[in-house]
Image: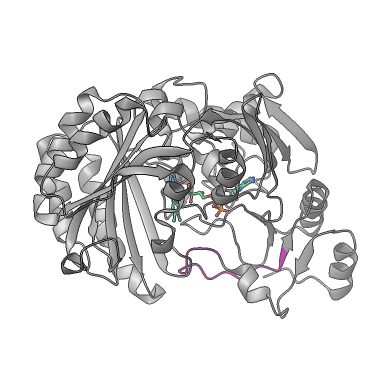
Amino acid sequence: MAHVLGKATINEFEATISGAVIKPGDTDYDAARRVWNGSIEKHPALVVRAASTDDVVRTVQFARSEGLPVAVRGGSHSIAGFSTCDDGIVIDLAGLNSVEVDVEGCRAIAGGGTKWKEFDAATQAHGLATTGGLVSSTGVGGFALGGGIGHLVRKHGFTCDNVLGVEMVTADGSVVHASADENSELFWALRGGGGNFGVVTKFELALHAVGPTVMAGVVFYPGDEAAQVATGWRDLLIDVPDELSTIVNLTTAPPAPFIPEEWHFKKVVAVVACYAGEADDPDAERVVKPLRSLGTPIVDLLGPIPYVDLQQLLDALWGPGAANYFTSTFLDAMPDAAISTLVDFHQRSGDLPIQEELHIHHLGGAAITGSDATAFTDRTSPFVLNCITRTPEATQLAERIEWARGARDAMAAFGNGRTYVNFTGEGGPDKVREAYPPETYARLQAVKDRYDPNNVFRFNQNILPSAS
Ligand SMILES: Cc1cc2nc3c(=O)[nH]c(=O)nc-3n(C[C@H](O)[C@H](O)[C@H](O)COP(=O)(O)OP(=O)(O)OC[C@H]3O[C@@H](n4cnc5c(N)ncnc54)[C@H](O)[C@@H]3O)c2cc1C
């Protein structure tokens, strides 16, 4: 039975909040309850748009006193829909989006609801950046807490590697800080363990000199050259510097003006690259050059580009509202058999407007160091595959999910079977347990026991308290 909040109770609570409290029936309730993934249909009892850390504290205390579950929302891009819930309270952090840049100290303090677009704008004003999302509407919050793979990953590590400290509201409404020197076990867990331990209201992130113009972009090749392109790419990676981060995307060409019209709606391979440095570094052109001749390019869009534009290059293709499912698997290697499996699934992918993609991210470099310094799932695999299906209507998604799961299962044979918690369309305790090495999961559970023994924060890749 859903717990119904009385009008007087809501009014009393609302009077303590400096942000906005949105209730069913309010004109903006429908927009406020929705998340990026259009297949998620949830109806929270309240959405609290927090304007301060105090608002978060009061909301957590209120939810606990009413016995209501809490969902925390950063950028709302969780594929599984973790940042909303039925009959509970959503704490929407979008208003906590200020970014203060310490140029000398090469660090930034970002509010817990900051989006990458906001973060990049503030930091790139000083020629600085940290590893961030490939789509700029994604939130720093969920991204950094689960890991964070972006164009700078091989040079500067996962986003979680760049977290220097946090301010966090715990399940009992306390405000704690975590860093290497303070609450260090919590600090370890937060970097890869997701939103399990509390509401992060501030992130302190390390910054690096990047751009502001970088050598980056995409080269598109015909889909029937997928095996040749993927093989050439794999062989090239044996000897590339950490500055170069690349992704191979087996996809279908959208009807976008930058792709020749005769290729629209046809299967293609997109090789996405970024050289993390300055575009006029003589090494930049030399290092990206072989990516231009992996097959017969349809269009070569690799060149100097402002880093901020690179970060927003894909935004138009990934707007909110469509139904989405992601699933992933880490890969130990890409033998020829793995490439033929990928090519086979690519050929069987749906046609637009059903959008189905296989992204193979090259990891390694800085992402491989510090194996147990954070709770990140997997430091050993040189690749992670993300299998994506996206349909205009939620009703179309169910029948396409099998394609994505089939690709993941077939490819899991080439890795340790673990998944990346941020690329996941489903939760469930068993799936989460399997995502981490057993010793990492046990350590995460000990931190969960200490900071959230009643599992107040359960809408995430949930680490179960040991007593449950
Ligand atoms: C279009 C798109 C592109 C993506 N691209 C990439 C990519 O390039 N690389 C990559 O690694 N991943 C990528 N992802 C996956 C992304 O990392 C996850 O979806 C991530 O969880 C999104 O974070 P969010 O804050 O936007 O999401 P939300 O849905 O707001 O939150 C996700 C989870 O994090 C928790 N959370 C969020 N903020 C906080 C906070 N401040 N304190 C405590 N808990 C919090 C939420 O409770 C929830 O459990 C992408 C996803 C999408 C939809």
The location of residue 64, given as percent across then percent down, is 77, 53
Q: How many marks?
A: 0
The location of residue 257, given as percent across then percent down, is 30, 66
Q: In the rendered view, does 302 fall on the left or right side of 421?
A: left
Q: In the rendered view, does 421 fall on the left or right side of 297?
A: right
Instruction: Please tell me in which quadrant of the rendered image residue 254 appears.
Output: bottom left
Q: In the rendered view, does 112 fall on the left or right side of 15?
A: left
Q: Is residue 46 magenta?
A: yes
Q: Magenta segment, which residues?
A: 35-47
The location of residue 49, given as percent across then percent down, is 73, 60
Instruction: Please tell me in which quadrant of the rendered image residue 390 appears.
Output: bottom left
The location of residue 219, given as percent across then percent down, is 23, 48
Q: Is residue 466 magenta?
A: no
Viewport quadrant of the C terminus? top right
At horizontal 22% and vertical 43% (from top left) the residue drawn is 411
Residue 136 in view in this figure: yes
Q: Tell me which secondary structure the magenta stretch mostly adopts.
A: loop
At horizontal 14% and vertical 51% (from top left) the residue drawn is 343
Viewport quadrant of the N terminus? bottom right
